[in-house]
Image (cartoon, rainbow, N blue to C red):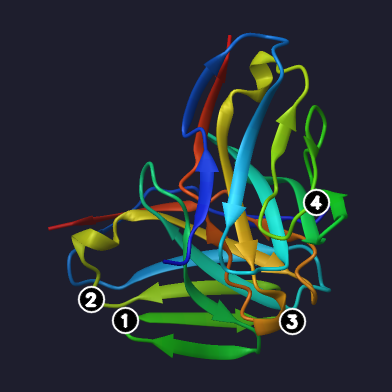
Amino acid sequence: EAQVTQNPRYLITVTGKKLTVTCSQNMNHEYMSWYRQDPGLGLRQIYYSMNVEVTDKGDVPEGYKVSRKEKRNFPLILESPSPNQTSLYFCASLALAQNTGELFFGEGSRLTVL
Amino acid sequence: QKEVEQNSGPLSVPEGAIASLNCTYSDRGSQSFFWYRQYSGKSPELIMSIYSNGDKEDGRFTAQLNKASQYVSLLIRDSQPSDSATYLCAATSWGYSTLTFGKGTMLLVSP
């Protein structure tokens, strides 16, 4: 089954404790992206990657890091989480070659930073 | 800053009516436009894409694009309670380097 898998789905942590949200896709998609979704602010792009070892900032990259060492994985790293990073996070992937623009989303990771 | 604007709603329509959702975008370089549906607590899913001026129909859904006016719309005919969701408009330039989403319009279809 074609899917984007995020882990953990739910996490409560404390300020300053480094955490990683993993994202893996099994569709051999070149493009992967992280979004955060907040009430009243919609989906905002954090980082994206056009292919292995190619990453770029989205609209709200501050406080986040990413890496793309393998095509299937695109982890989101919060080195020192703060309460303003409490949000619902979505990972998504897209097949650039198919040119449909269809983003496949993971189920989301709800993060609370105390 | 590329922006996609949507009325947050909620837009309330009775079952069987036509729901009309609208979206404007700021970047004249945008080439591809998408409508995603997001049920509460779920991830977005693509329902329509449109690339050329005019109308594109798929079942009960019709997407309309007017690049001169920088305007995209989604019509849902014969609305059903199961259509109740938040509809996200998105735009990108060629290459999909950044896909910008609007904040979404909540649609409520009452039986």
Residue where numbered disc 3 is placed: B68
CB under 8 Å between discs 2 and 3: no
Amino acid carrying mark 1 in the image = Arg
Q: Position of residue A10 (x, y in %)?
A: 46, 28
Point 77% across, 62% down: residue: B26
The answer to whether any part of residue B69 appears in the image is no
Can you give x and y, in whole percent of width and height, for residue A107 in the image?
46, 47
Res. B23 visible in picture = yes
- The answer to whether tags 3 and 1 share a subunit is yes
Circle 2 SS class: loop
The correct choice, above or below, for A27 with respect to A16 in the image is below
Residue type at mark 3 is Ala
For label 1, the residue is B60
Q: Residue under label 4, please give it.
A: A69
Image quadrant where residue B17 sits: bottom left
Q: Quadrant of the C terminus of chain B?
A: bottom left
Residue B78, labelled with which disc? 2
Give the crowd class for mark 2: few <14, some 14-19, many >=20 residues within 10 Å.
some
Q: Give the alpha-carbon distance from disc 3 to disc 1, as whole Å.
A: 26 Å
- Subunit that carries the residue with mark 2: B
Q: Chain of mark 1?
A: B
Dot placed on the residue nearer the N-terminal end, 2 or 1? 1
Q: Is residue B24 above or below residue B101?
A: below
